[in-house]
């Protein structure tokens, strides 16, 4: 919980989360449209698997720039 969430109802918090996710999805879609590589991991997934995904993504980026 952050300061600007204190005192808000569950519905208000859900609205904030949905708005944030919509903006994030918009940004991702625009990045993909112009060819910016995107790495997606999910917080609920295994942390070790997410680390492998991130390291592989970084490795592939480095290989493409060489």
Image: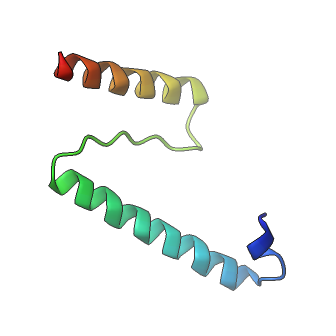
Q: Position of residue 5 (x, y in %)?
A: 76, 74
Work out which quarter of the rendered image holds the N terminus and state it. bottom right
Work out which quarter of the rendered image holds the C terminus and state it. top left
Count of numbered badges drawn on the protein: 0
Up/down of 24 relative to 56, above or below: below
Q: Position of residue 21 (x, y in %)?
A: 48, 66
Up/down of 2 relative to 63, above or below: below
Up/down of 4 relative to 45, above or below: below
Its colouring scheme is rainbow
14 relative position to 10: left or right:
left
35 relative position to 17: left or right:
left
Q: Position of residue 41 (x, y in %)?
A: 46, 40
Please tell me which residue lies in front, 37 or 11: 37
* Location of residue 36 by image quarter: top left
31 relative position to 55: left or right:
left
Q: Position of residue 52 (x, y in %)?
A: 46, 21
Q: Residue at x 58, y 44 (%)?
A: 43
Residue lying farthest to the front in this orientation: 66
Q: Residue at x 31, y 43 (%)?
A: 38
Please tell me which residue lies in front, 20 or 9: 20
* Location of residue 62 by image quarter: top left
Up/down of 65 relative to 50, above or below: above
9 relative position to 17: left or right:
right
Q: Residue at x 36, y 39 (%)?
A: 39
Q: Residue at x 32, y 56 (%)?
A: 28
């Amino acid at each position: 919980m952050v300061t600007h969430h204190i005192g808000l109802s569950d519905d208000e918090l859900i609205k904030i989360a949905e708005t944030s996710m919509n903006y994030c999805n918009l940004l991702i879609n625009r990045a993909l449209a112009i060819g910016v590589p995107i790495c997606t991991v999910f917080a609920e997934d295994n942390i070790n698997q997410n680390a492998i995904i991130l390291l592989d993504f970084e490795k592939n980026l480095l290989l493409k720039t060489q």
